[in-house]
Image (cartoon, rainbow, N blue to C red):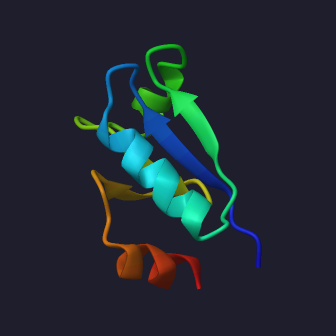
C-alpha cells in the first residue's frame, strides 16, 4: 500500500536530514515541504518543531521518530 508522506521542514532544520535518510534507507518515497515557503501547511498542521511527518494527510510525528514506530505507521 502506498502512503502519501510529507516531511515538513524549515531551512535550518538539521534533524530533517536524519528523517530523510531514514526514509531513504527504508526505500520509502516522500515529499519535502518547506513550511517557510508554504505557510498554509502550518495552518493545517500547527507544529512547533521540525521535522514533522505527515502520513496520508494526518500529522503522525514531530521530531525524529524511532524507525520501528515509523514502520508500524506505514505497515
- Residue 35 in picture, x, y percent from top left: 46, 24
**Which quadrant of the view contains residue 10?**
top left
Q: Which residue is found at the position 76% from the left and 70% from the top?
A: 2
- Residue 68 in picture, x, y percent from top left: 38, 82
Q: Is residue 2 above or below residue 54?
A: below
Which residue sits furthest right?
1
Nearer to the camera, 39 or 23: 23
Q: Which residue is found at the position 42% from the left and 29% from the top?
A: 43
Nearer to the camera, 49 or 43: 49
**Which quadrant of the view contains residue 59?**
bottom left
- Residue 48 in picture, x, y percent from top left: 23, 35
Q: Which residue is found at the position 40% from the left and 19% from the top?
A: 11
Q: Image check: 45 left or right of 7?
A: left
Q: How many marks?
A: 0
Q: Quadrant of the C terminus?
A: bottom right
Q: Is residue 46 above or below residue 5?
A: above
Which residue sits furthest left?
48
Q: Which residue is found at the position 58% from the left and 54% from the top?
A: 57
- Residue 69 in picture, x, y percent from top left: 37, 78
Q: Quadrant of the N terminus?
A: bottom right
Nearer to the camera, 58 or 66: 66
Q: Image check: 48 left or right of 15?
A: left
Nearer to the camera, 22 or 36: 22
Amino acid at each position: 500500500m502506498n502512503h502519501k508522506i510529507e516531511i515538513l521542514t524549515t531551512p535550518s532544520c538539521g534533524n530533517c536530514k536524519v528523517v530523510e535518510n531514514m526514509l531513504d534507507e527504508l526505500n520509502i518515497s516522500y515529499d519535502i515541504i518547506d513550511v517557510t515557503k508554504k505557510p498554509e501547511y502550518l495552518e493545517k498542521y500547527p507544529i512547533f518543531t521540525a521535522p514533522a511527518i505527515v502520513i496520508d494527510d494526518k500529522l503522525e510525528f514531530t521530531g525524529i521518530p524511532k524507525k520501528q514506530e515509523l514502520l508500524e505507521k506505514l505497515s
